[in-house]
Image (cartoon, rainbow, N blue to C red):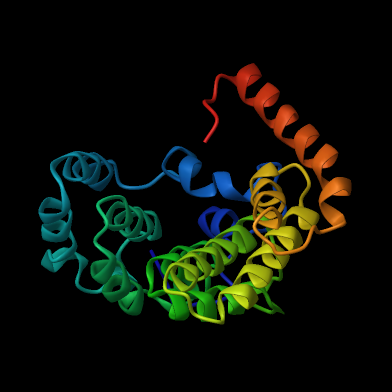
């Protein structure tokens, strides 16, 4: 059950709280349903509902049996949250998040996913909190910084199109955030690719780009090779 004990040491919390693992961070949501043993009834129903669309998933979320999430298996709660994400029911994600037990609300994966689906400025605030070291999280990571960098990138793109003066500052923040994420875990090429790509958009050349390009290229190559070895398609 999803209890209100913030020190719960069950496998689900080890998975979603970013305790040391072999997997690269951004694979967590993809492997979640295969990695945790939870109610097959809800697993099958939610998988079918996602294929049907947003209304079907929202109907499951509104069922009386899911009214008190303290009495629901943690795996079911997280899978429902991710199913709402899959059908872009962002308001439903936020509502479900606020009904979750405190330990699940504090889980880094949940806060990252919620932050990405909030409005741009709210997303930045939420994801910045995720990237700060605290008792609830371990600080910057390739996944958190990739999400936060995307938030800054989207805001920069909008400001650029509208000719607003803050566009330049948002571009710099996007680059620095992506770069920090890549430096946290060089095995994850995604934030590095974004960092060097956005450097091309600056008014002046960034001297770090020449140093980063070989490392990012190697990281991306190794990622592709590893995915091919285990039969996983690149993201």
The front one of 88 and 82 is 88
Q: Which residue does the image show at 78% across and 57% down from the upper left?
A: 184
Please determine whether, in this image, residue 88 is positioned above or below residue 28: below
- Residue 51 point in image, percent of width and height: 19, 39
Name the quadrant containing residue 214.
Answer: top right
Q: Can residue 17 be seen at all in this image of the molecule?
A: no
- Residue 85 point in image, percent of width and height: 32, 56
Q: Which residue does the image show at 69% across and 22% down from the upper left?
A: 225
Name the quadrant containing residue 189.
Answer: top right
Q: Can residue 195 be seen at all in this image of the molecule?
A: yes
**Left or right of residue 137, residue 125 in this image:** left
Q: Which residue does the image show at 53% across and 61% down from the upper left?
A: 150
- Residue 167 point in image, percent of width and height: 56, 74
**Left or right of residue 174, residue 16 in this image:** left
Please determine whether, in this image, residue 185 is positioned above or below residue 179: above
Please determine whether, in this image, residue 61 is positioned above or below residue 192: below
């Amino acid at each position: 059950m999803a209890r209100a004990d913030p020190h719960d040491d069950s496998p689900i919390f080890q998975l979603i709280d970013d305790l040391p693992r072999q997997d690269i961070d951004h694979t967590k949501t993809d492997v979640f349903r295969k990695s945790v043993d939870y109610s097959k009834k809800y697993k099958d129903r939610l998988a079918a509902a996602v294929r049907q669309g947003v209304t079907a998933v929202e109907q499951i979320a509104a069922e009386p049996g899911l009214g008190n999430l303290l009495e629901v298996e943690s795996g079911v709660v997280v899978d429902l949250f991710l199913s709402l994400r899959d059908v872009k029911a962002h308001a439903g994600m936020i509502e479900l998040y606020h009904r979750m037990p405190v330990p699940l609300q504090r889980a880094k994966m949940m806060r990252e996913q919620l932050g990405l689906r909030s409005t741009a400025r709210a997303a930045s605030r939420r994801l910045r909190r995720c990237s700060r070291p605290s008792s609830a999280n371990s600080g910057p990571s390739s996944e958190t910084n990739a999400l936060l960098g995307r938030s800054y990138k989207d805001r920069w793109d909008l400001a650029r199109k509208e000719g607003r003066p803050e566009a330049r500052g948002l571009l710099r923040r996007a680059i620095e955030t992506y770069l920090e994420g890549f430096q946290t875990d060089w095995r994850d090429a995604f934030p590095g690719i974004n960092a060097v790509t956005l450097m091309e958009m600056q008014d002046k050349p960034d001297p770090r780009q020449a140093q980063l390009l070989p490392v990012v290229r190697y990281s991306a190559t190794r990622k592709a090779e590893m995915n091919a070895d285990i039969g996983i398609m690149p993201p």
